[in-house]
Image: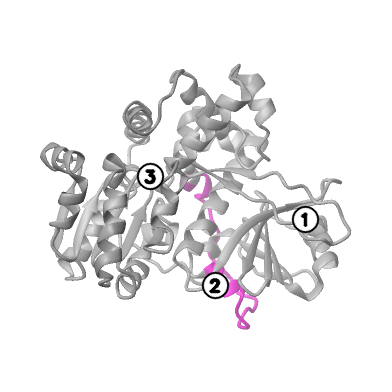
Amino acid sequence: MFPRALANRVTELLQTMPAVLLQGARQVGKTTLAKQLIQTGVMQHYFSFDDPVLLSAATQDPVGFVRELPPRSVLDEVQRVLPVLPAIKLRIDAHREVGDLLLTGSANPMMLPRLSETLVGRMATVTLMPLTQGEIEGRQDRWVESLFSDDFSPRRFPRTSDLLERVERGGYPEAVLRSDARERVDWLAAYIDTLLARDVREIADIERLAEVPRLLQLLAAQACQTLNVAALSQQTGVPQTTLQRYLTLLETLFLWTRVPAWFANLGKRLLKSPKILVNDTGIACMLLGVDAVRLATDPLLQGRMVENFVGMELLKQIGFSRQRLRLYHFRTDRGEEVDFLIEAADGTLVGVEVKASATVNASHFKGLRTLQSLVGNSLRRGIVLYWGEQTVPFGEGLWAQPVSALWCSPD
């Protein structure tokens, strides 16, 4: 059992909000986390809509079902009975008791038609993602928060000799627990097949279901590239309007996410297209039929997968951070770019560039220097992550740092 950093955040929210929605892809550990909260006394009762009897009862009379729930109840896989959400709204409006309900869902109801308005302002929403590297190793992941602190000094971190193996493995608990690579790939393939066959049919009316796996594979191949719907439409032969529905569906199931472009009125033309981020590099590698050995011989694919790996680690740490942070990417119309840009609530920025290289030189900071010249002191720090050991300064506010800093304590 892996300790989840998000558990403290969920517990805190249940002390101030009447309901919390714990959402995330299937098999990332939502049910395990919910049951842990029952064991610790935070919640008291557990109901799963995977139980056909409960599913039938809630479907036939959602208002009555929700009304009779005891306080401090967990409702697992709530996306299977979406009519209970308006009933939950009625319960919350009538009672407003903190910590009353914990919902879990494998589809994001905020992206489903007519349901987002039902939930806004009435419950907190947190997203559980696949395991961080720190969670796998029993460490605390606080690197993102450290980027905004005053205490940032040169430190030495362990050299990462197994980065591509980490990329290939991904972060799904079941996959992490399987030491045999073939078994892990088989599990991931069966997971995607089941997800697309079951959940896609439950939440959407899809005319050409056979096109969806192909689209997911293309998203994996274009990981960390800007989203181009017209090009994807040409590659799949699916009309753009239909393709947009498919993209939204796969995003609703937490299989990929859009990293929005950061832009401001700075007198320079900035691109506004989002960047593709697959939610797990283990799944991406399985879809593309590659392993760590193949990644080591394909610099282009290696670069994309390592960047995607880092992007997901950033998103996960942002998700359980006490600070209000958002993840973006930065790119000008002249091709100057920063892989990831983290923005704090006060507008402070940290740029993160990813280099799949054991060495760093000044040219690797080109995008960060461009950003620095545009935003000035708003850029708190610019970091190039690389495969080395030393944290090295490259000018005012600019640093090269080992990628292992994401999850390791300094030596």
Of the numbered discs 1 and 2, the one sitting upstream in the chain is: 2
Q: Image height check: is 153 above or below 288? A: below
Can you tell which of label 1 and label 3 is closer to the viewer? Answer: 3
Residue 182 located left or right of residue 390: left
Q: Which residues are magenta?
A: 143-166
10 Å crowding of disc 2: few (<14), some (14-19), many (20+): some
Q: Image height check: is 267 above or below 273? A: below
Circle 3 residue = 25
Amino acid type at mark 3: Ala
Is most of the magenta stretch helix, strand or loop?
loop
Q: Position of residue 80 (x, y in %)?
A: 28, 40
Circle 2 residue = 145
Circle 1 residue = 364
10 Å crowding of disc 1: few (<14), some (14-19), many (20+): some
10 Å crowding of disc 3: few (<14), some (14-19), many (20+): many
Label 2's element? Answer: helix
